[in-house]
Image: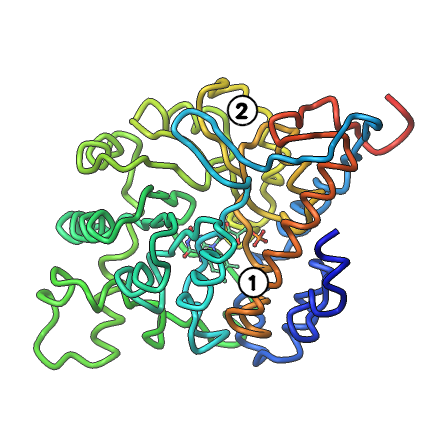
């Protein structure tokens, strides 16, 4: 009831509580090129649409009269312990939507006690983000650079700054073909935004000529940040490098999930990068049950790509996820109202999730199972 009792004040300023409408509100305040960078997808946008359609094809089948006074949102699977089944997805270059960028987002995440996953391509350094977050758990997303010394340095800095897990994103051996960004001629990184983890890195700095300007920094970043030669055989090298749990993000095929575990990963994140990489892929949600079946019950499996509402979280959990990464909606909150905007968005999502648990007859997220779902259509 909390969110109703608080009345219109529950809304961050005048932000909508409809989490699917935030994109439209953000469109009003962002320059078109920036809006397109965040909202845009690869190619025709088919994967982006498929992600949403996959959620819509499932219907919840609630059970009633189950005693749901208390709802326990906490998650526990293998080494994964979370207060709620939600983390903030790694999203690059957040100062393009708000001057405080990741600092504001991580503060809002810490307020909500949800782990923030910091992108490799952040506009504030991982040390500054750690300081802003305080003691709340945070994860670091690694784009594994081709320079081993630089990769090692980034991982060591993440460890030293108290990040508690590594998210290794593997669906980016090349950038996605994103017509909107190409037409606007806009990518933040090429203007030097989103490179703070590199410009603050001693190994990266050492490779630059003295007095290097933005162009030289961008060129050097471009030469070390992509790593299309990576294969599964290399994963044990990273496994040896760090004791942090490693979650491999960007897996759709169950065989890749198996290979990730065989290489030493602790978990996988089923994701098609929100439809931003390869146009025409399967929806992430549609790949989830096969990945869960492939890895078994004792491995953390997370999902992102298309999660918008509390009901979506329930559907993802019912299909085998332990938690979801929440992506674009929090960035729209950041664009609209900085830290309070992100806070508002997270609060709405958690409120809707809590209500969805009550309304489906689940006293805890552990009670969510496949029996809660049916394909759209008549009673199965
Ligand atoms: C991303 N995503 C992403 N993923 C990652 O591993 N590293 C990154 O730096 C980024 N950067 C990034 C920028 C922008 C603008 C977006 C929208 C997304 C992908 C992100 O983590 C997540 O997979 C998607 O956002 C999920 O899709 P939805 O639910 O946001 O549509």
Position of 49 relative to 345 (above/below) = above
10 Å crowding of disc 1: few (<14), some (14-19), many (20+): many
Q: Which residue is under mark 2?
A: 292
The x, y position of residue 148, in whole percent, is 16, 47
The x, y position of residue 304, in whole percent, is 55, 44
Q: Check disc 2 and report its element: helix, strand or loop.
A: helix
The x, y position of residue 281, in whole percent, is 58, 42
Write the residue at 32% across / 74% down.
192
- Residue at the far right: name it: 378
Mark nearer the N terminus (1 vs 2): 2
Q: Which residue is under mark 1?
A: 343
* Nearer the camera: disc 1 or disc 2: 1
- Return the residue nearer the eye: 308 or 193: 308
Task: Report the disc number at residue 143.
Answer: none
Q: Is residue 253 left or right of residue 145?
A: right
Write the residue at 83% across / 34% down.
376
10 Å crowding of disc 2: few (<14), some (14-19), many (20+): many
């Amino acid at each position: 009831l909390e969110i109703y009792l608080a009345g219109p004040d529950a809304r961050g300023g005048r932000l909508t509580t409809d989490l699917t409408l935030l994109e439209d509100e953000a469109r009003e305040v962002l320059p078109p090129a920036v809006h397109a960078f965040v909202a845009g997808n690869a190619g025709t946008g088919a994967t982006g649409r498929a992600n949403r359609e996959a959620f819509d094809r499932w219907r919840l089948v609630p059970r009633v009269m189950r005693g749901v006074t208390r709802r326990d949102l906490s998650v526990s699977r293998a080494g994964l312990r979370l207060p709620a089944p939600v983390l903030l997805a790694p999203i690059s270059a957040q100062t393009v939507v708000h001057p405080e960028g990741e600092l504001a987002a991580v503060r809002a995440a810490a307020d909500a006690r949800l782990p923030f996953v910091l992108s490799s391509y952040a506009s504030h350094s991982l040390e500054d983000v750690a300081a802003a977050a305080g003691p709340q758990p945070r994860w670091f997303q690694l784009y594994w650079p081709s320079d081993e010394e630089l990769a090692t340095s980034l991982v060591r800095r993440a460890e030293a700054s108290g990040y508690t897990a590594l998210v290794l994103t593997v669906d980016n051996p090349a950038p996605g073909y994103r017509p909107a960004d190409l037409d606007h001629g806009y990518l933040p990184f090429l203007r030097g935004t989103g490179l703070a983890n590199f410009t603050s890195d001693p190994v990266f700095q050492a490779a630059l000529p003295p007095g290097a300007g933005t162009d030289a920094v961008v060129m050097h970043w471009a030469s070390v940040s992509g790593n299309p030669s990576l294969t599964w055989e290399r994963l044990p090298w990273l496994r040896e490098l760090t004791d942090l749990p490693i979650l491999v993000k960007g897996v759709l095929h169950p065989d890749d999930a198996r290979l990730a575990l065989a290489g030493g990963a602790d978990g996988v994140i089923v994701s098609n990068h929100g439809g931003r990489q390869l146009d025409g892929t399967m929806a992430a949600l549609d790949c989830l049950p096969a990945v869960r079946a492939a890895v078994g019950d004792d491995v953390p499996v997370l999902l992102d790509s298309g999660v918008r509402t509390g009901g979506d979280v329930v559907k993802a959990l019912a299909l085998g996820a332990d938690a979801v990464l929440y992506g674009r909606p929090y960035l729209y909150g950041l664009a609209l109202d900085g830290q309070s905007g992100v806070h508002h968005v997270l609060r709405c999502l958690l409120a809707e999730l809590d209500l969805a648990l009550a309304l489906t007859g689940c006293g805890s997220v552990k009670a969510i199972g496949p029996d809660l779902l049916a394909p759209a259509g008549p009673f199965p």
